[in-house]
Image (cartoon, coloured by chain):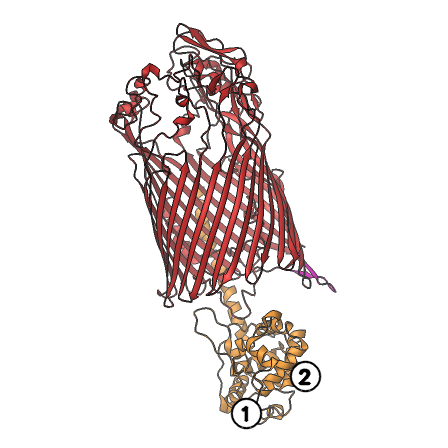
């Protein structure tokens, strides 16, 4: 394994500290769309504007030679030279650039992390085509930008308008997203809604060896999708100070991604030596992605001298053109009582995301007040609706389940594989939201200001769906396409007053919602010319619906301090403390949504239903919590042309939970040195380190006690949740990133160099009170150091570019990229040997553990 | 391979730095050296100029023909030099000599001057007492433009660079990069005819040979003919 040795890194940092500086980050910030993409770029040029970023050799200002700094001390970047050419006798001028060239990717160029968001291919590319026209007299402009790496990785944008009057924009772009380049799905029909088994495999009846052979013979393929976005927006003055704006954006996502495929548990059924293996089934399938999302934005605003007004309607419409995923199951499913099953479980089915609509209307009004004050009022109403057709609970034919003796568990598919088996053919799901926000601010003097804010928000979930089959008169939903009911007596997923009268299953949706009221009071003090204090108090009162608590109260205090007394340095610090408490905690507020609430429910063996969960469990968003945050930022101008900055930050969360999330912490540091000695030279060095920890605890239930006396007891330390089944894990992660960037224009040749490094290390430690806490107590002798193997992710990317002119207005750019990386995740260990284990079949072999890929290119640049 | 590539980075940076160093040095020296005629002079790092005023007095006989024996011009088409910034005067002589600024008379007069001559002459005229104050109308449109500008038209206040009393700038204390204050002229008492002519030259681009003229080009573009007239009259009477 190659690693960046600390010594090497130190040398790099030292050398860089001597001779390099920061790039002048001057992105294309000419506009912001109200709907659409803010940033246009691709793997070739993430900024999307770099070839146009030729710094003006005349510097920042004719008034002074040096660089100005922001109020906090950071250097402003050197301005770019527009390079505009005026037409004789016309008020119009133009600028433009065409960059065409050839790319060649080498090495492990198919590595997942190398091409995750870039469709690198060998061949011609359009680096950038940019053309703009400006009218200095009228303020009118037209601008076009385009870049194309491939048909799946490209963008085009047209903007036009007149400053102070109107602007329009139209764009189109394709963005690839590779999910896996090492996938071996055994099914035919990948990318569609119907995954069928290849020849040689029998649905619901294949041998383990046949499945393993199918996996071995499956061809390697990529899994991923392409986002295609297109949009149109317009904004302009309608009358005096009234400005209207409208935009529509449509995004299509097409492709596939890795998905699941359950056929009940497999871990509980060890292989008995049968050619058909154990029982149940766990499959990693591939699902189709065929989404479109249309966003609409309509607004009207008025910016007067005293009053400001804004009204905006936002609509979002999601459509999934694939409503289901059917996948054939190769494994033999048998029941645990030894009866013959009525039929093989051959198919699984997922209902994919339903179509849904979102509407929101927001009104904002603000007015200037005395003492440099302002009153701001905002109100909004929103509604989210989903009423897509519902799929039947199962898609089998014939019968499933088993019958014999006391076990009369036949599932007649015809009673469940039709929409007539549903209480409603569509869900009528709806959530309405309401918002009111009033804020007032005053700055009666330069030394003092204060503000107060009152905000009310409500999320009202009106969805009421009852899982009831009018054909059979039964409640609930056949779980996992009938597989669970084909294995375990009683566990079909449904309730009735007969055979299933002891089944406690979910029969209705839980209409989660909440109301939130927030009050904030804050003040600013300028204590002399070099110190500023800011103190903000917030009280947040939340009333969740159908949750473990009916009330949550959180108080927060944040103190911020800005100090400029350390020479030219600016020191900014803040500390924040939050304390969340609430009403009594009910670990099971969901009984009304389960069949235990229905008449006719009979407790199994005369015992109340099995406890929903352990009573000591505290969900992390509902538990008492004490939170502390601190941040210290130091920015120090080093000479006239460089800046050193450092940020230290940390967060500590302590949850009052015996079980559940107990604490989290984050500690980090970022440091940067920026250097801009002249318009022709800049460089930077940065480093970032962050460490996070999370501790959570839980208790394994005593499976042997299900439906027996004591199983109804939710108490921690009781028979169902004994103390000896307690376990705890500590999730630790350390992330590093570093980089060096340098560019210099020698007059005839421009050199760009950069090196960027990212590393992430994670570790999961655990401890447990006794082997009873484990799903497989028998593996205790194999557990050495109470930790899973370490995971890591690491990439190192080195870029070099050389640009030089070959004729007037014609230049050449040569560049190269060398990226290496390594990846280790123990979840993927062993997949190099096989992707098939008993009744488990996996598809993704995982990212390459080591890769080295390169990219070289030559571009011809024409100034237009 | 990876480590080798990484070590190439600092090597390349050092090479880049080494090659860049002479280029930087040459650029910094260029304005001060003045050996070769140029069409543009960057005054943003212009140092304060010092000379021998006494020696300058001995070299000023020809100058007095137009600019007066005591530096107060004999006719309104010539600028008053008495009490002017020595650095400003030196820079102007140098621009006449090098060609960044041209005038039928001054181009020829500056041509034979040595650098010491220019420094001495500049110091001499800077040491002379100012022309006596006039009686400018503080409520006039010209006064308003000079002191406050006209934000609606994008006209900046002249006093920002030329001082509230037109006796030169009054720099503020700041760690930020400073404009070359000493190269900005004192305008108090200059004739309206002369100021009008200069603003016209800035606006038309006829006077465009230095970084300072680039500033004035932007300012002059915002001024109408009436604006130029009222400001010139105000300064004349100041």
Residue A467: give x, y in percent of width and height: 48, 23
* Residue wearing tag 2: B104
Q: Which residues are magenta?
A: A82-97
State the orange chain. B
Q: What residue is shown at x 53% (from left), y 10% (from top)? A: A398
Residue at the front extreme, as displayed: A599
Q: Residue furthest bottom?
A: B69
Q: Nearer the viewer, residue A718 or B236?
A: A718
The quarter in which the N terminus of chain A is drawn is top left
Residue A465 on image: x %, y %: 50, 27
From what the image shows, is residue B171 above or below residue B236?
Answer: above
Q: Which class describes the residues within 10 Å of circle 1: few (<14), some (14-19), or many (20+)?
A: few
Residue A278 position, x and y percent, is 40, 14
Q: Which chain is tinted red? A: A
- Is A515 placed left or right of A140 in the picture? left
In percent of the image, x 60 and y 84: which residue is there?
A: B234
Residue A668: image x %, image y %? Answer: 36, 48
Label 2 Cα crowd, 10 Å radius (few <14 / some 14-19 / many 20+): few
Q: Which is more toward the observer, A139 or A352?
A: A352
User: Which mark sits nearer the N-terminus, 2 or 1?
Assistant: 2
Task: Place residue A664 in its image quadrant.
Answer: top left
**Quarter of the image containing the C terminus of chain A?**
bottom right
Distance from the alpha carbon under mark 2 to that under mark 1: 29 Å
Residue topped by disc 1: B132
Question: Which residue is situated farthest in the right direction here?
Answer: A89
Tell how many labels.
Answer: 2
Q: Secondary structure at mark 2?
A: loop
Using the rendered image of the protein, determine whether residue A132 is visible from the camera's viewpoint: no
Marks 2, 1: nearer the viewer: 1
């Amino acid at each position: 394994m190659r690693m960046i040795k600390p010594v090497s890194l130190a040398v790099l940092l030292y050398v860089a500290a001597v001779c390099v500086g920061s790039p002048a980050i001057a992105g294309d910030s000419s506009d912001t769309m109200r709907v659409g993409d803010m940033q246009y770029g691709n793997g070739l040029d993430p900024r999307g504007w770099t070839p146009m970023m030729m710094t003006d050799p005349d510097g920042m200002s004719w008034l002074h030679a040096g660089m100005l700094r922001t109020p906090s001390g950071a250097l402003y970047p050197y301005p770019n030279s527009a390079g505009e050419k005026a037409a004789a006798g016309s008020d119009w001028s133009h600028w433009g650039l065409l960059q065409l060239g050839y790319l060649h990717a080498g090495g492990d160029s198919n590595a997942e992390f190398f091409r995750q968001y870039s469709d690198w291919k060998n061949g011609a590319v359009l680096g950038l085509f940019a053309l703009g026209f400006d009218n200095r007299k009228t303020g009118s402009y037209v601008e076009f930008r385009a870049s194309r790496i491939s048909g799946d990785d490209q963008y085009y944008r047209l903007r036009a308008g007149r400053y102070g009057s109107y602007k329009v924009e139209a764009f189109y772009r394709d963005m690839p997203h590779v999910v896996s380049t090492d996938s071996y799905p055994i099914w035919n029909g990948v990318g569609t809604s119907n995954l069928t088994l290849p020849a040689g495999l029998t649905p619901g009846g294949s041998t383990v060896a046949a499945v393993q052979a199918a996996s071995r013979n499956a061809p390697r393929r990529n899994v991923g999708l392409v986002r295609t976005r297109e949009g149109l927006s317009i904004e302009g003055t309608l009358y005096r100070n009234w400005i209207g704006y409208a935009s529509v954006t449509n995004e299509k996502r097409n492709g596939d991604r890795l998905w699941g495929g359950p056929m009940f548990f497999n871990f509980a059924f060890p292989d008995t030596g049968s050619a058909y293996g154990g029982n149940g089934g766990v499959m990693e399938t591939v699902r189709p992605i065929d989404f479109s999302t249309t966003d609409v934005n309509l607004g009207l605003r008025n910016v007067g001298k005293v009053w400001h007004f804004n009204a905006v309607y936002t609509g979002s419409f999601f459509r999934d053109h694939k409503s289901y995923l059917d996948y054939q199951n190769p494994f033999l499913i048998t029941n645990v009582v030894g009866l013959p099953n009525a039929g093989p479980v051959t198919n699984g089915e997922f209902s994919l995301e339903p179509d849904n609509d979102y509407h929101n209307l927001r009104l904002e009004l603000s007015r200037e007040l005395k003492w440099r004050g302002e009153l701001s009022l905002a109100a909004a109403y929103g509604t989210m609706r989903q009423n897509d057709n519902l799929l039947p609970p199962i898609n089998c034919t014939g019968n499933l389940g088993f019958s014999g003796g006391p076990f009369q568990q036949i599932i007649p598919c015809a009673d469940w594989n039709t929409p007539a088996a549903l209480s409603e053919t569509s869900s009528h799901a709806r959530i309405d939201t309401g918002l009111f926000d009033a804020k007032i601010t005053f700055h009666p003097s330069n030394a003092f200001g204060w503000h107060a804010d009152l905000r009310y928000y409500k999320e009202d979930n009106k969805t009421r769906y009852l899982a009831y089959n009018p054909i059979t008169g039964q409640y609930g939903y056949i779980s996992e396409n009938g597989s669970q009911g084909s294995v375990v007596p009683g566990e079909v997923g449904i309730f009735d007053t007969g055979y299933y009268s002891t089944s406690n299953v979910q029969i209705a949706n839980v209409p989660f919602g909440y109301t939130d009221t927030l009050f904030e009071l804050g003040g600013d003090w300028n204590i002399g010319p070099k110190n500023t204090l800011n103190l903000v108090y917030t009280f947040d009162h939340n009333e969740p619906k159908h949750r473990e608590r009916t009330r949550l109260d959180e108080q927060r205090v944040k103190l911020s301090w800005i100090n400029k007394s350390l020479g030219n340095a600016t020191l900014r610090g803040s500390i924040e403390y939050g304390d969340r408490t609430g009403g009594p905690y009910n670990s099971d507020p969901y009984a009304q949504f389960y069949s235990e609430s229905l008449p006719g429910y009979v407790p199994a063996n005369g015992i109340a239903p099995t406890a929903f969960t352990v009573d000591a469990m505290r969900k992390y968003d509902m538990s008492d919590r004490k939170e502390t945050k601190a941040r210290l930022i130091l920015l120090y101008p080093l000479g006239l042309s460089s800046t050193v900055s450092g940020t230290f930050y940390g967060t500590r969360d302590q949850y009052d939970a015996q079980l559940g999330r107990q604490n989290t912490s984050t500690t980090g540091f970022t440091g940067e040195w920026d250097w801009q000695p002249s318009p022709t030279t800049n460089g930077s060095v940065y480093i970032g380190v962050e460490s996070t920890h999370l501790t959570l605890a839980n208790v394994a239930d005593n499976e042997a006690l299900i439906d027996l006396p004591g199983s109804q007891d939710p108490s921690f330390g009781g028979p169902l949740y004994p103390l000896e089944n307690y376990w705890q894990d500590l999730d630790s992660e350390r992330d590093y990133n570093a980089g060096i960037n340098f560019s210099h224009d020698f007059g005839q040749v421009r050199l760009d160099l950069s090196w960027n490094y990212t590393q992430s290390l994670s570790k999961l430690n655990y401890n447990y009170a006794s082997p009873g806490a484990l799903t497989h107590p028998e593996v205790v002798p194999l557990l050495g150091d109470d930790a899973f193997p370490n995971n890591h992710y690491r990439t190192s990317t080195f870029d070099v570019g050389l640009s030089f002119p070959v004729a007037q207005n014609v230049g050449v750019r040569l560049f190269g990229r060398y990226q290496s990386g390594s990846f280790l995740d123990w979840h993927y260990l062993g997949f190099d040997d096989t992707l098939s284990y008993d009744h488990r079949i996996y598809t993704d072999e995982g990212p390459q553990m080591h890769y080295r890929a390169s990219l070289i290119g030559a571009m011809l640049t024409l100034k237009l | 391979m990876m480590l080798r590539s990484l070590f190439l980075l600092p090597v390349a940076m050092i090479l880049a730095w080494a090659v860049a160093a002479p280029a930087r040095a040459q650029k910094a020296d260029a304005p001060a050296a003045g050996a070769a005629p140029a069409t543009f002079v960057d005054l943003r790092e212009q140092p304060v100029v010092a000379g021998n005023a006494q020696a300058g007095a001995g070299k000023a006989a020809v100058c007095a023909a137009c600019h007066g024996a005591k530096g107060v011009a004999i006719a309104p088409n010539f600028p008053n030099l008495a009490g002017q910034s020595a650095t400003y005067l030196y820079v102007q002589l140098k621009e006449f000599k090098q060609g960044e600024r041209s005038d039928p008379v001054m181009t020829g007069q500056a041509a034979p001057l040595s650098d010491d001559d220019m420094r001495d002459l500049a110091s001499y005229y800077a040491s002379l007492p100012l022309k006596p104050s006039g009686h400018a109308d503080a409520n006039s449109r010209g006064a308003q433009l000079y002191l406050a500008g006209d934000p609606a038209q994008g006209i900046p206040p002249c006093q920002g660079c030329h001082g509230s009393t037109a006796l030169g700038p009054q720099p503020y204390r700041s760690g930020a990069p400073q404009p070359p204050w000493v190269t900005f002229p004192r305008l108090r008492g200059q004739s309206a005819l002369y100021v009008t002519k200069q603003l016209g030259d800035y606006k038309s681009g006829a006077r465009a040979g230095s970084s300072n003229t680039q500033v004035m080009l932007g300012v002059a573009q915002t001024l109408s003919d009436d604006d130029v007239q009222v400001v010139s009259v105000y300064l004349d009477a100041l």
